[in-house]
Image (cartoon, rainbow, N blue to C red):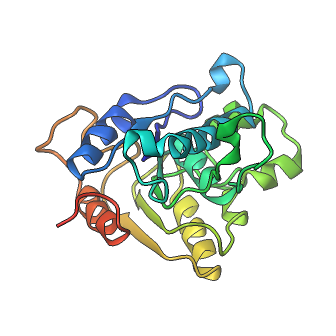
Amino acid sequence: MIICPGGAYASLAPHEGVHYALWLNEQGITGFVLKYRLGTSGYRHPAMMQDVLRAIRYVRAHAAGWKLDPNRIGVMGSSAGGHLASTAITQFDAGNPDAPDPVDRFSSRPGLGILCYPVITMGQYTHSGSRRNLLGENPDLKLVESLSNEKQVTRDTPPTFIFHTFEDATVPLENSLDFAAALRRNGVPFSLHIYPKGGHGIGLGSAQWNPDQRHSWTTECAIWLKEQGFGKRP
């Protein structure tokens, strides 16, 4: 699993990175925490998208040597990292068989996506800080449209697990609802969970790594991952 931590495209939150990787390890899944480029370091789109798609290709290219299944490589993200993960599951490509770099010959399509209280749109319900750090102050409307990922879903988008909280006052719930609706329209299987309590950035359930304080989304997601063929086998 390629893990994209949140942080408004300004920072990378550890509790949405390494903590997720440790939880995935418990499910029998290898986690790669992606340190993608950030707006606060002077980068803008498409640098972040290039980073996540390259990560998927890189893991797939090295899957045999690392004893991984190249057909079971997913992407996971929270908040702005959820936007990056939703970009990966909607804007992948099949690779370039003639590329001089062998890694670029591999597909960047993830096998599934996990979106945790994600930023999805760059439109009405966006998170303004994430949009600014990704696209700049006054982005072209065509760029806004192209990075509003609820509008980029196709029938080829992989199965997706989504969770959000009703109380999230940072990233509006409409981000997850609109993405789920787009998946439904395109016939893409998904698992959507809206929890009444909890704000934004809850991670596994606590900002600190504490195995005794996990939110129930982790149980639901672990079940879903097994249904998708990811993780420990009986």
78 and 23: which one is in front?
23
Q: Is residue 136 above or below residue 95?
A: above
In the picture as drawn, the residue positioned furthest to the top comes out as 41
> Within the image, what quadrant is residue 175 found in?
bottom right
Which residue occupies 41% across, 71% down? 191
- Does residue 225 appear in this view? yes
* Residue 230 point in image, percent of width and height: 34, 61
Q: Is residue 191 above or below residue 60?
A: below
Position of residue 19 in the picture relative to residue 46 (left or right) = left
Q: Is residue 114 above or below residue 2?
A: below
Which residue occupies 42% across, 37% down? 32
* Residue 78 point in image, percent of width and height: 46, 45
Which residue occupies 50% across, 40% down? 62
- Does residue 205 appear in this view? no
* Residue 116 point in image, percent of width and height: 43, 52
38 and 229: which one is in front?
229
* Residue 9 point in image, percent of width and height: 59, 32
Position of residue 217 in the picture relative to residue 72 (left or right) = left
Tally of marks: 0
Position of residue 68 in the picture relative to residue 26 (left or right) = right
